[in-house]
Amino acid sequence: MHATHNTLPEHTRSQVCDILSARLMDSSDLYFQAKTAHWNVKGPNFIGLHKLFDKLAECAAEWSDLIAERLVQLGGQAEGTVQVVSERTSLEPYSPSMVDEHDHVHAISAALAQFGEYVRDGIEKTEELEDMGSSDLLIDVARDVDKLLWFVEAHLGEAVAHSHAHKRTPARGHSTRR
């Protein structure tokens, strides 16, 4: 931990930094997943999805920045290189070979839902640690995630979205990072 005059106890700041660092990895991964979908999507809804995935990437970049800045404010170290993110993300891997719009929509909606779940878990934990600043930041992120998930899932259709939501797989062995 870096020295700071922040009045939150150091043990609290350390635990919150661990939570924020995990979400930084995920939001950065989500950015790259959204850009991959943005660049590669094909199908009848190309332009709408192309723009939607770009908007998601912009939001994920903003979330990463906000989370990283809060992490450093608390005395932590923000790590965001591609190498670190690929090693530490909790999100499922994104297949770079996808082209079909439906495959991208399914994969992006699953990633958003998973990220949203982890963010809500972070809200709970930061509230328990009495860091309302970090909790408030994560609440804003969760609200954005839910809105974007709604936009993406609109391309699935209700029956498909419902069945897909029940088929999500847990993150690849990173459940302790939530």
Image (spheres, rainbow, N blue to C red):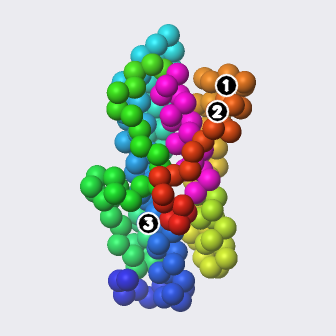
Q: Which sits in the foreground, 178 or 45?
A: 178
Q: CA distance from mark 2 to mark 1?
A: 6 Å
**Res. 164 mark:** 2
The N terminus, quarter of image: bottom left
- 1 in relation to 62, above or below: below
Indicate yes or no whether the magenta region holds residue 10: no
- Name the residue at 67% across, 76% down: 128
Q: Where residue 165 appears, x then y in whole percent?
A: 66, 37
Indicate yes or no whether the magenta region holds residue 113: yes
> What SS does tag 3 mark?
helix
Q: Are marks 3 and 1 in contact (CB under 8 Å)?
A: no
Q: Which sits in the foreground, 107 or 129?
A: 107
Specify the amino acid type for callout 1: Val
- 140 in relation to 60, above or below: below
Specify few, some or many for label 3: CA neighbours under 10 Å numbering under 14, 14-19, or 20 or more.
many
Name the residue that disc number 3 marks.
Answer: 21
> What SS does tag 1 mark?
helix
Most common secondary structure along the magenta stretch: helix
Name the residue that disc number 1 marks.
Answer: 160
| Residue interval drawn in magenta | 102-118
Q: Is residue 154 left or right of residue 47?
A: right
State whether residue 173 appears in this view: yes
Q: Where residue 53 appears, x then y in whole percent?
A: 46, 31
Quarter of image, res 89: bottom left
Front tag of 3 and 1: 1
Q: Are marks 2 and 1 in contact (CB under 8 Å)?
A: yes
